[in-house]
Amino acid sequence: MTDIVMRLDGVYKKFRKGEMYDSLRDLIPALTGRLLRGSGGDALAPREFWALQDVTFGVERGEAFGIIGNNGAGKSTILKLLSGIMRPTRGTLQVNGRLSALIEVSAGFHPDLTGRENIYLNGTILGMTRAEIRRRFDAIVAFSELEEFIDTPVKRYSSGMFARLGFSVAAHVEPDVLIVDEVLSVGDYLFQQKCLERMNEIMTGGATVVFVSHNLRAVSTLCSRALLLDHGRVITIGPSNEVIKTYLTRGHGARAAEPASDIRITAVSLGAPQSSRVTFETDEFLDITVEAAARSPHEDMSVVLQIVDGNQYPVFDTCTQRLGAGPLALAAGETLTCTFRVQLRLAQGTYHVNAFLHRYVTDRPFDRWLSAATFFIAGTPTVRGVVNLAPSLITCEKAMLTGRLAAPAPVAG
Amino acid sequence: MEKGRNLAMSAWLGHLVARRDLLYMLTWRDIRIKYKQSIMGFLWAILLPMVIVLAGVVVRYAFSWITRAPLALADIASVSVRAVPWAFFVSSIRFASTSLVSNRDLVTKIYLPREIFPIAAMLSQLVDFAVAAVVMLVVLAVLGVGASVELLWVPGLVIILVLLTTGLGILLSAASLFFRDVKYLVEVVLTFAIFFTPVFYDARMFGLWAPVLMLNPIAPLLEGFANAVVLHTAPPIAWLGYSTGVSLVTFFAALRVFHKLEPYFAESA
């Protein structure tokens, strides 16, 4: 018998587009309309739409569960329902235990109050008692790295400092269920790492985590299971890597625009055929296959493979020409399959594969496919950044200073 | 049915008691924000009652001039005793009715028992009320208004006033979240309500028409304060019972309505 902490059963949520009734004058016609139509229920009135439809899932105790999907898929609505801010239009929802949400962690701050005062205010808003905050106060301040500014009104904080203080308070609530929505985009790189570590700590402490993010790498490393949402409906639930793969292939199935040319890239795939792996180790060899098809004859072509990092910054590119294949030619109805083998000397992170069909001489593309595939490099504990330069430590020795710098001068007299 | 409601009531109270630290911090915040960066500081607490008393003295002076009866010290004391609770009522309603709108971020983004906002707004005004009441008592003592056993009515009157104020505050806070015009409506009513409430005058000055004035549930309370503190007599008991009834009904009805509307807060705010 598994221990379900959180369960949604056939949950529907209806929203209304456009203006709400903001003044009494608008209310009376609206109420009359409602009385005539009945209370509504399952039927959609004009301007209404379903933000969630028939969402069912359960999360077990101690599990880390990811929710992914495009903007507007209904991810935040699920979190709002879970945290009790909104109630479902239909269906049941059940949460057992103290729930804390890392959503809008600085919503409770008052600009005129100091950092110290805001820690107490926001802490009680997030569900701690004053005694608990007093006990954890030093840890919260140390985590935020804002010791110097703790008695400064937060209106003088930078937005990064503001977010850091917010996360620090929220990260010390010690909930049974932790809900996280995109907070990891706050602060600089080092603070983000610290937040991830703190989330790991909370999870090893036995808490259940529900994590909503566009950061697929974070979902893939933190969560064992995930759910894919699209336009308010559950597409799939399963092991997070498979769900991410489904998400990525769905997204790329439909390319933005048909290229004018009648030669095109038809598929870009990673690893062995039918493999669903998207996370690889650093230094591992990876086969990337690019397929193309021509409807009319084309000559003088080369296939270019480019890898960009999570910020779309080019990391690497190569092409069939440089690798010695010479100009490629396709007759009408022919297909081309090129498999590149690369060694992933990359640091931990998200990477996208771009593929291009270029003219051999002019570099004018016949066709291109950006972010045709996405993969992740799993944790590289020794390096950060983009490339893995395979560092090792040669010397790390201690010695005594000599001369004037050796020791502070003795006090005169 | 009745039992079920009582059960829900005690669950609600338990819920609120569990978040008492939040209630404390929100009240503290409201007070702190008001006095931070202000020159007058706690003088603010007695400013509104003082202005009301001054206005009352002017009105009373005009009365005495027309009726050619001398303006008695007891009259001024009576106006003062009515002005302080009235100031509490007015500023609490004003502050509580906008409390959800001004905490919109917290209402839409974080789950809290939302009635905490109007209650905290009322509590922060209650602190001002306490400050003003102490100042007023000192002034009355100096003026030679003695004490009597009737003063024991005062805590009871305060409790009923708090109940009525909280009920109205909770109701209006939810209403202003849905309709922006509620705020202006409240302003208009509060500005002119003093003419329909026995603050500057005593209800009995209206003779036969006095009962009409007493239908205003605050009126018996203000009469009660003046009786107990200045005249050293008991409040008008029957009317006080009426006030208590109205306050209780308002309070519980407000909570019920508030909880009925609460699921729509996050979508309407």
Image: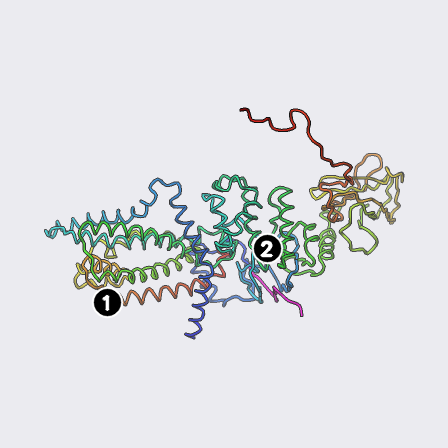
Residue bearing the label numbered 2:
A76
- Inspect the image, locate mark 2, and give the three-letter code of the amino acid beneath it: Ser
Q: Position of residue A187 (x, y in %)?
A: 60, 43
Q: Position of residue B18 (x, y in %)?
A: 47, 61
Q: Position of residue A7 (x, y in %)?
A: 61, 65
Tell me how the rendering is colored.
rainbow
Mark 2, secondary structure of its residue: helix
Q: Position of residue A266 (x, y in %)?
A: 80, 49
Q: Chain of mark 2?
A: A
Q: Which mark is residue B237?
A: 1
**Residue at 73%, 51% in the rendered image:** A252
- Residue extending furthest left? B68
Of badges 1 and 2, nearer the viewer stands 1
Highlighted magenta segment, given as a residue range? A1-14
Q: Is residue B191 visible?
A: yes
Q: Nearer the viewer, residue B165 or A399?
A: A399
Q: Left or right? Give the position of B149 relative to A303.
A: left
Total count of labels: 2
Q: Left or right? Give the position of A98 relative to A265.
A: left
| The stretch drawn in magenta includes residue B112 | no
Q: Height in image: A292 above or below B255?
A: above
Q: Is residue B186 visible?
A: no
Q: Quick check: do tags 1 and 2 share a chain?
A: no
Q: Nearer the viewer, residue A24 or B134?
A: B134
Q: Left or right? Give the position of B78 relative to A338.
A: left
